[in-house]
Image (cartoon, grey):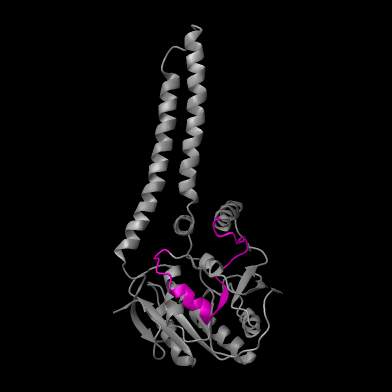
Amino acid sequence: MTTRGIETEREGLLSVVIPAFNEEQSVPLAAAAVVGVLKDAGIPYELIFVDDGSKDGTWEEIRRAAEAFPGVRGLRFSRNFGKEAAIFAGLAAAAGSCCAVMDCDLQHPPEKLADMYRLWQQGYQVVEGVKVHRGKESPLRAAAARTFYAIISRATGIDMSRASDFKLLDRAAVDALLTMREKSAFFRALSSWVGFSSAQVEFEVQPRAAGQSKWSLGSLIRYAVTNIAAFSAAPLQMVTFLGEVMLVIAVVLGVQSLWKKLTGRALEGFTTVILLLLFIGSMLMISLGIIGYYIAKIYEEIKDRPRYIVSDRCGGEPSEKTNETDL
């Protein structure tokens, strides 16, 4: 556990936000585990499960947990809006002086919440859960993750190679995040970008408590592309780089062709021309695709639709801090 910052003792309610998508098996396990840890540690708490448009019995399990455990509440989306929206919905509904975010599958160990809370009591405003290692994953997935975090780290100026969504934020940091109205918000990066005094708690990624991961390779790629575009202009800079490369190639080939023309050794046939046209056309289409993706994201933002829609609630009265659409 590494720290840096200030030392002041304080007390307050801890809100734990737990996004859930098709996690009917994990919800009762997560509720029991988190409540048990916080009770044993003597920490005042509330748990907020956010059902992100699940198709299984996740909402029914959240309702049962709210009936079984005092301090457990639930929000239900009208459809699947994504994990980032679920996190922000939970933060907006939270009543605590500090808020933690963790996964429903218990790969984030609940016992670390007590360590995070103690650091918050000392005065730290952002407590980051950092992975000791990434756990079991294929070489391809590990390489893709390294590339993704290298781009995000460059964009933020913060080392995010071991970053996770497992965090505890002071109310001031939560309120700062909730003022950010972009629809494609990347919580993992934004929570570091906002600043504030910070500390770190290391943790081992645990095996899933139940069920299977809902992240396919395709969904992970979409998640990475969305968040890179939301937080970085690196792809647009790549378009500029491709243009510079094409300029260098054009100058070199132009000089070579002119020299051979002047010396009477001009190449016959169109093979070189066809290859160049195919190469240039491919680069142009890639560049237009990148630019078009950013334009589409701008279009989504200016429509100003709500980040999520809450269709149902359970387990007590909602906080007054909700700022999105309810049915």
Question: Residue 299 sits in which quadrant?
Answer: bottom left
Asked if residue 130 shows in the view, the reply is yes
Residue 274 in percent (x, y) is at 41, 23
Does 41 lie within the magenta span? Answer: no
| Residue under the image location 32 percent in, 62 percent down | 302
Instruction: Assign the C terminus to one quadrant of the image.
Output: bottom left
**In the rendered view, does 129 fall on the left or right side of 89?**
right
Q: Where is residue 159 in the image (x, y as percent from the top left)?
A: 62, 61
Say if the magenta span includes residue 180.
yes
Camera-side residue: 234 or 143?
A: 234
Let me know if residue 23 appears in the view: no
| Location of residue 193 with respect to 46 vertically, above or below | above
Task: Residue at 46%, 42% (x, y): give it.
Answer: 239
Q: Percent x, y for residue 180?
A: 43, 70
Q: How many marks?
A: 0
Q: Quarter of the image holding residue 192?
A: bottom right
**Quarter holding the N terminus?**
bottom right
Q: Give the range drawn in magenta.
A: 155-184
Furthest residue toward right: 2
At horizontal 50% and vertical 28% (from top left) the residue drawn is 249
